[in-house]
Amino acid sequence: MATLTVSLVQIFATISGQGQYKIINLPQYTTHNSFIKKNMVPGGYGGGGSSSGWYTGTGSGGGQTAVKFVNNDLFHRVIVSGGGGGTDDGNDDDGTGGAGGNLVAQGWFANGNYVGNYLAKSDSGFSFGQGEAAIDAKSRNSKGVQSYDMNDIAGAGGGWFGGFASHSPISGAGGGSSWALTEDAVIPPGVIDARDEFYENPVMKNYAFTKTSGFLFFDVQHAAGVWQGNGKLIITF
């Protein structure tokens, strides 16, 4: 919940899609094939990371719900609700994903134990607006996990900054952070590097607004892990 008073301004919205849990049966199954984009489990709309197309199943990351002013791009977002991270398969070594939301989102669980070393925050994460996908290699972001296993790998949640993938077959993936343009908001300084779920195709720009742009939100409340399914946005005037 948040309140804002502005003059007439063009408003855009992204309504998130939930992540998916699927078992992928490939006609010519190889480990490498399960990490080819067309064979993976797609992440939710709004920056959710894709998970590997594994024969025992994987879960992709949920997307973000966001409001944007003036232009419809990542750099004009003014309020963001982060999406949750996906899970690996449903076997006994199951690792669940972290909840999306809050200024610092959750990491993930590895065989029942919480891992909080790789977190999406207000000024850092996998990428601006995008959760990390499963790949058959270590994370291409130097701040991500620098080891890997080519199995049932979960996709991370989208958010203000997207979450990290664990690249582990006994772990889920991290959630994406929430954010709002408030008086005490942390705005990433300088040029922001926004990339896709495979950490490719960079777009580099400054954030569009400052705290004196006339778009501050007040009475913002964050709550993580309270919503399931596709995103929902209610705007009242």
Image (cartoon, rainbow, N blue to C red):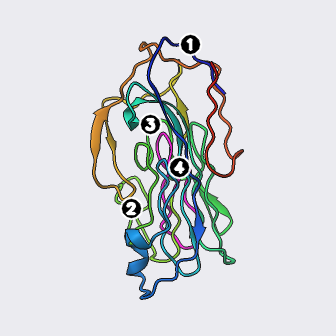
Kindly identify the amino acid type of the residue bearing the numbered disc 3.
Asp
Residue of label 3:
123
Prevailing secondary structure of the magenta residues: loop
Q: Which mark is residue 63?
A: 4
Residue of label 1:
5
Residue 102 appears in the picture as rendered: yes
Q: Secondary structure at mark 3?
A: loop
Where's residue 67, x and y in %? 51, 32
In the image: residue 99, left or right of residue 40: right
Mark closer to the chain start, 3 or 2: 3
CA gap, disc 3 to disc 2? 19 Å
Span shown in magenta: 156-175
Q: Is residue 179 above or below residue 133?
A: above
Residue of label 2:
139
Quadrant for the C terminus in the image:
top right
| Residue drawn where x is 43% and y is 71% of the image | 148
CA gap, disc 4 to disc 3? 18 Å
CA gap, disc 3 to disc 1? 26 Å
Quadrant for the N terminus in the image:
top right
Kindly identify the amino acid type of the residue bearing the numbered disc 2.
Ser
Mark closer to the chain start, 2 or 4: 4
Q: Is residue 46 above or below residue 200?
A: above
Q: Is residue 49 above or below residue 160?
A: below
In the image: residue 233, left or right of residue 80: right
Circles 1, 2 touching at the beta carbon (< 8 Å): no
Mark closer to the chain start, 4 or 3: 4
Q: Is residue 104 magenta?
A: no
State the residue in front, 229 or 218: 229
Q: Secondary structure at mark 4?
A: loop
Where's residue 221, x and y in %? 66, 29
